[in-house]
Image (cartoon, coloured by chain):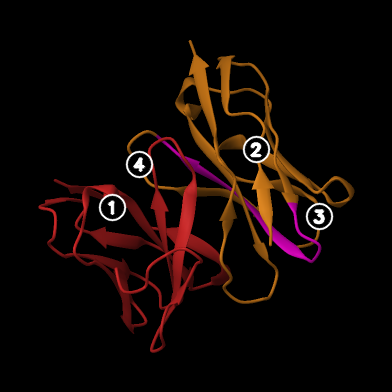
Chain colours: A orange, B red
Amino acid sequence: AQSVSQHNHHVILSEAASLELGCNYSYGGTVNLFWYVQYPGQHLQLLLKYFSGDPLVKGIKGFEAEFIKSKFSFNLRKPSVQWSDTAEYFCAVNKNTGTASKLTFGTGTRLQVTL
Amino acid sequence: GAVVSQHPSRVICKSGTSVKIECRSLDFQATTMFWYRQFPKQSLMLMATSNEGSKATYEQGVEKDKFLINHASLTLSTLTVTSAHPEDSSFYICSANGGASPTAQFFGPGTRLTVL
């Protein structure tokens, strides 16, 4: 069975600081990788996804993630965070089957950006 | 595009009653819908996978007779929590696959269920 680990549970940063959130997964086959964000009181929104190709994926709002297959990692990065980035961030993975398959989520990382 | 809605957004019910939650894909046809449960400050846990016109596939530990799922059309799936108890209080979220990106899931806003 696949699993996802997010080692940072709560991260506090000042505005303009750089961000990197760790995500590691365990699954022996080909996977799709996702980062979702959940702003306070709102529903999950897709930040970015990796299916194949260039391992450096750029998403919305200045976020990017790099898939490193040898490390089973898909870390999320942003060069300069803003107060509005305060949210819960979830890494997720599913099997790359070409059709819908269930997502396995990490436990989430709460990001708090201070002014 | 790829908007998923849920109704109701919030429901409070008495113990022993049943509650139905609807999940709709508004601008695309969803071949598959998923139902998740999220406890406070925790991650989403998949409850079941729902395919249009067929029985749902439940995850281990999820009671299929308690959480009834009906995927009646390509744009609607319903989750009925039968004989609800306080421990069923949670945030229920659906997602749908389909549209231009069949392997990506789009999430609904969730339904907060409180059982008194």
Q: Which residue is mark 3?
A: A54
For the point 68% across and 26% down, the residue is A79
Mark toward the viewer: 2 or 3: 2
> Residues under labels 2 and 3: Cα distance?
23 Å
Are discs 4 and 2 less than 8 Å apart at CB?
A: no
Which segment is the magenta one?
Answer: A26-39
Question: Percent from the top left, x then y, of residue A83?
Answer: 48, 20
Q: Chain of mark 2?
A: A
Callouts 4 and 3 on one subunit: yes
Indicate left or right for A52 with A45 as reference: right
Question: Which element is circle 1 on?
Answer: helix
Are discs 4 and 3 less than 8 Å apart at CB?
A: no
Indicate left or right for A24 with B70 as reference: right
For the point 85% across and 45% down, the residue is A71
Which amino acid type is marked by label 4?
Gln
For the point 75% across and 53% down, the residue is A26
**Which quarter of the rendering shows the C terminus of chain B?**
top left
